[in-house]
Image (cartoon, rainbow, N blue to C red):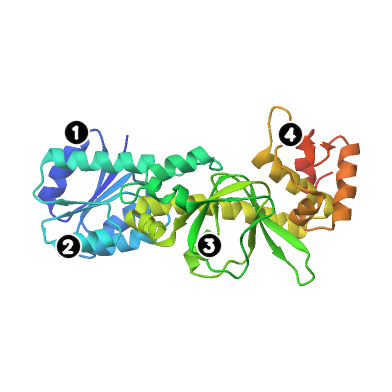
Amino acid sequence: MKKILLIEDNLDVRENTAEILELAGFDVSTAENGKRGVEQATSKDFDLIICDIMMPELDGYGVLNILNKNPRTSAVPFIFLTAKAEKMDFRKGMSMGADDYLTKPFEETDLLDTIELRLKRASKLAAPAATPSPEDIKRFLESAQSEVSIESLVTERNTKSYKKKDSIYREGEYPHALNYIVKGKVKLSKSSDYGKEFITQLCGPGEFLGYLALLENSAFNEEASAMEDSEIAFIPIEEFKKLINSNREVANNFIKILSKNVLEQEERLLKLAYGNVRERVATVLLSLYEKYGDNANGMINLAISREELAGYAGIATESLIRTLSDFKSEELIATEGKSMMVKNHDRLKRIASGGI
């Protein structure tokens, strides 16, 4: 049963609206003013919030402003309810991030249809819980087409092919578009003053590149280059901003996808910072296996050189080769040229966590 919070200071409107929603099968909570509404919204989980604008204690605009800043409530669909119908009120509410608007008095069908539309839209735009696949990203982007057609953004004129080792962008350059990997694999790396490469991230189809620089309006802090023949789509900055700004749900779910990637990278880098050589190598092997591994045979489907793998682990190439040889003799992995197969996932996991 979907949970709805109704914030309305007029007793008759509050009771009548709550009755309509309850008869329609919703679990309804009510608040008589904006302050009480914020208290309830931030202490319980709701699927949708309906809020009057003109209220004592705290008006609807203040409620929306507070809820937008709270991670718990920022993605909850928000519908304004008001007796005013001036265009200025509509514009102000929508520009603040409201998802819809109902003008009192309203028909019962209008109320229920609006709620149904917003709940369906929120469900469609829910970010993938697991690491997003190309199909997940495609479905997510397709569901966000209310203001911008994704097909018009990712077209042949906005797509470029790269050969292995080609640079996609360099450290210090400024972004002109959001980079999206259509196919292939890309590494993000930084180089020391002595020219030693450290790989910070490996990316594949369905992932975005350089989004932090774009969001911060800053230069890239790493280089992106193709590890194999790749195809990159470029979504123009203005179109990307229009897509994000057009719908609060789109923005929140896009942030969720990116946040998951950032958290995974932070966890990996933390292990590399404090782990010994065996722990570092085990960590990067598990990372590659979880991202590119074949559960059927344990094969890591990524052509990565020993130098690149050492750069990803943050160790010398000689140390990497010696450790891989040890892992091979311990029957933790098998190697054939650049190909690697994980034979004992559980043991590698124990080593990566500091065990034996």
Residue in the image at 38% along x and 57% along y: 239
Q: What is the crowding at mark 1: few (fewer than 14 residues within 10 Å), some, or many (at least 20)?
A: few
- Image quadrant occupied by the C terminus: top right
Front position in the image: 177 or 63:
177
Mark closer to the chain start, 1 or 3: 1
Foreground mark, 1 or 2, reads 2
Residue 342 locus on image (x, y percent): 77, 36
**Residue type pointed to by label 2:** Asp
Report, in whole angstroms, how far the alpha carbon at label 4 lies from the one at label 3. Answer: 32 Å
Which residue shows up at 52% across the image and 70% down it? 218
> Does the image show residue 324?
yes
**347 or 13, which is in the foreground?**
347
Left or right relative to 335: residue 180: left
Measured as percent of width and height from the top left, residue 167 is found at 64, 59
Picture quadrant where residue 68 is located? bottom left
What residue is disc 2 on? 89
N-terminal-most mark, 1 or 4: 1
Q: Secondary structure at mark 3?
A: helix
- Quickly name the residue at label 4: 299
User: What is the C-alpha distance between the residues marked 2 and 4?
Assistant: 59 Å
Which residue of the protein is positioned furthest toward the left in this rendering?
105
Q: Position of residue 159 (x, y in %)?
A: 50, 50
Q: Assign a secondary structure to mark 1.
A: helix
State the CA–CA distance, disc 1 to disc 2: 30 Å
- For label 1, the residue is 23
Q: Tell me the quadrant of the picture where the N terminus can be found.
A: top left
- CA distance separating discs 2 and 3: 34 Å
Q: Is label 2 or label 4 in front?
A: 4
Return the x and y of residue 31 as percentages of the image width and height. Answer: 24, 52
- Of badges 1 and 4, nearer the viewer stands 4
Task: Tell me the element at label 4.
Answer: strand
